[in-house]
């Protein structure tokens, strides 16, 4: 059983309400550019879902299109999150509301009149609850009013996607690291052309090769520093990627790193 | 003997350390601890001197833990390892007033139902040992060598879901212990653990 909407409940209370919004498709018109499916979660106060790097705990949302072989989904795009949690256990995510964006390319023919979107996520408060659902999407449900409302919603959340760091000269940066006695490395990233003191935080991308001590991330006037441990001892750090926070806005960076 | 003396000092001094726990580095001595099992018996890490010990942080209410036990993955590796003489201890550091806090009787019932094959199950209600090891998630795994040194710290596998390791390409505990028992260096010594946060 699936439907266009899904409500996740806990102790008879609705804690997450999931739906899909669209941008770039209209019934009867074949899109010539990739269009967007927005995964819209309304979250009960106190609960939260997660960024692509959930942090020390949690799990990111996943989305998959089913029943439409001519639709190719790209990588899910996560809006800029905020830091949630305690001093010791750092997590990144969303409270109240979030729209994750799934870019979709039409490979051939026309957009199917019906397809499904399989979603999984984890929502946490003092306890954590996983959800798995498959939402139906009907092309005919795109009335002109819905098209306008969806566009407004997606515009609002597209503006909250992390922006390229180059726009803020954050691409002009270099990271150096030094090996510590306990096998960890201390990393320092310096930005060359930014106004001192504007960076407020750094949220690293998930890494397969390093375990980052998220509570160690510190911002100074000169840049950002953190400790991490190579999962395989001796693995060199070649780059540091993530989002640099300036207030509540996130800027994507991928900084080359070298040993000091 | 000297190692355990140092470890005991570390345990005693742990309560005086400032708020932020220091991540226990792989290659450093595992600090000794003393906790009660579900029968109320006191168990110390130093009771198992000379043996490989696996520590598994557990919260039976956490969907990642339920996933590992629901798939049978955790019981299977517990059985495999304990058959080799390895000690497997679960530690529950959930604070007593948390909605997922289960007392010893309830914990015993759940672990019995799950057919856990752990050597023993320990309660860490004052969260001292969780903080001592800086356990962040459930599950969060630690492997201690027969020499008392920490050899692995992190995730159980690379599945990173609540599916209980069904999509895992590697189980880090099996890999680390296999290497240790073959006299090799552990290749992957640290990973980012995944799961629910420990309910401190």
Image (spheres, coloured by chain):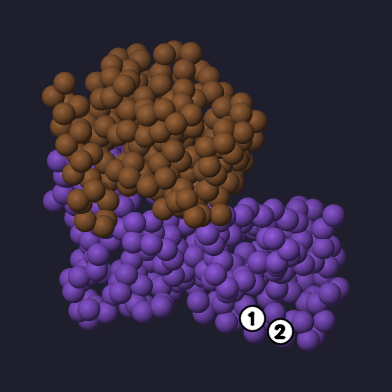
Chain colours: A purple, B brown
Residue A30 position in % (x across, y down): 77, 71
- Give the residue displayed 42% in from the left and 63% down from the top: A85
Real-space CA distance between mark 2 and mark 1, rounded to the nearest whole angstrom: 6 Å
Residue at figure coordinates x 50%, y 62% from the top left: A51
Q: Chain of mark 1?
A: A
Left or right, residue B62 beside residue A37: left
Left or right of A38? Residue B172 is left
Whether residue B106 sits left or right of residue A14 in the image: it is left
Q: Are marks 2 and 1 in contact (CB under 8 Å)?
A: yes
Q: Is residue B85 above or below residue B144?
A: above
Mark 1 Cα shell of 10 Å, populated few (<14), some (14-19), many (≥20): some
Vertical order, A101 against A58 (above or below): below
Q: Is residue A37 visible?
A: no
Give me the disc on residue B72.
none
Residue A113 lies in what quarter of the image? Answer: bottom right
Counting from the top left corner in percent of width and height, residue B155 is at 44, 39
Q: Is residue B187 above or below residue A172?
A: above
Question: Residue B10 location, x and y as percent?
Answer: 19, 39
Q: Badge 2 is on which residue? A: A149
- Residue A54 or residue B48, whichever sits in front: B48
Pointer 1 residue? A153
Is A48 on the left or on the right of A188, as rendered? right
The picture places residue A138, in percent across and down from the top left corner, at 83, 68
The quarter of the rendered structure image containing the N terminus of chain B is top left
Q: Are marks 2 and 1 on the same chain?
A: yes
Residue located 82% across and 58% down the image: A2
Taking the spot 53% from the left edge, 42% from the top edge, the residue there is: B103
């Amino acid at each position: 059983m699936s439907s266009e909407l899904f409500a996740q409940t806990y102790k008879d209370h609705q804690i997450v309400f999931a739906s899909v919004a669209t941008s770039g498709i209209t019934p009867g018109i074949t899109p010539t550019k990739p269009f967007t499916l927005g995964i819209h979660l309304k979250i009960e106060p106190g609960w939260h879902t997660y960024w692509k790097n959930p942090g020390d705990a949690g799990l990111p949302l996943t989305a998959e299109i089913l029943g439409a072989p001519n639709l190719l989904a790209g990588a899910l795009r996560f809006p800029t999150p905020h830091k949630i949690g305690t001093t010791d256990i750092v997590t990144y995510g969303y409270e109240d509301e979030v729209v994750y964006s799934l870019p979709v390319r039409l490979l051939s023919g026309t957009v199917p009149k019906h397809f499904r979107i399989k979603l999984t996520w984890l929502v946490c408060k003092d306890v954590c609850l996983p959800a798995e659902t498959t939402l139906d999407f009907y092309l005919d449900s795109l009335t002109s009013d819905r098209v306008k409302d969806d566009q407004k919603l997606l515009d609002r959340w597209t503006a909250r996607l992390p922006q390229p760091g180059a726009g803020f000269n954050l691409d002009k940066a270099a990271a150096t690291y030094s090996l510590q006695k306990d096998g960890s490395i201390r990393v320092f990233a310096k930005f060359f052309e930014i106004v001192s003191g504007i960076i407020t935080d750094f949220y690293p991308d998930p890494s397969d090769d390093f375990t980052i001590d998220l509570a160690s991330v510190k911002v100074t006037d000169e840049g950002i520093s953190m400790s991490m441990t190579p999962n395989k001892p001796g693995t060199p750090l070649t780059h540091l990627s993530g989002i640099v926070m300036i207030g509540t806005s996130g800027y994507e960076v991928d900084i080359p790193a070298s040993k000091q | 003997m000297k190692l355990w003396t140092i470890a005991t000092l570390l345990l005693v001094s742990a309560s005086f350390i400032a708020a932020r726990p220091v991540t226990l580095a792989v290659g450093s001595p595992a600090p000794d601890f003393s906790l009660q099992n579900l029968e109320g018996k006191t168990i110390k890490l130093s009771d198992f001197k000379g043996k490989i010990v696996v520590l598994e942080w557990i919260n039976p209410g956490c969907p990642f833990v339920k996933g590992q036990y629901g798939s049978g993955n955790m019981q299977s590796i517990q059985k495999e390892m304990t058959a080799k003489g390895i000690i497997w201890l679960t530690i529950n550091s959930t604070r007593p007033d948390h909605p997922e806090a289960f007392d010893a009787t309830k914990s015993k019932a759940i672990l019995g139902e799950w057919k856990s094959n752990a050597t023993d199950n320990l309660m860490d209600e004052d969260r001292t040992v969780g903080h001592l090891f800086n356990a962040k998630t459930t599950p969060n795994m630690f492997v201690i060598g027969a020499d008392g040194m920490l050899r692995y710290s992190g995730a159980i596998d690379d599945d990173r879901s609540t599916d209980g390791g069904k999509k895992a390409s590697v189980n880090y505990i099996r890999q680390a212990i296999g290497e240790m028992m073959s006299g090799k260096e552990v290749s992957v010594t640290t990973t980012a653990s995944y799961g629910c946060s420990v309910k401190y």
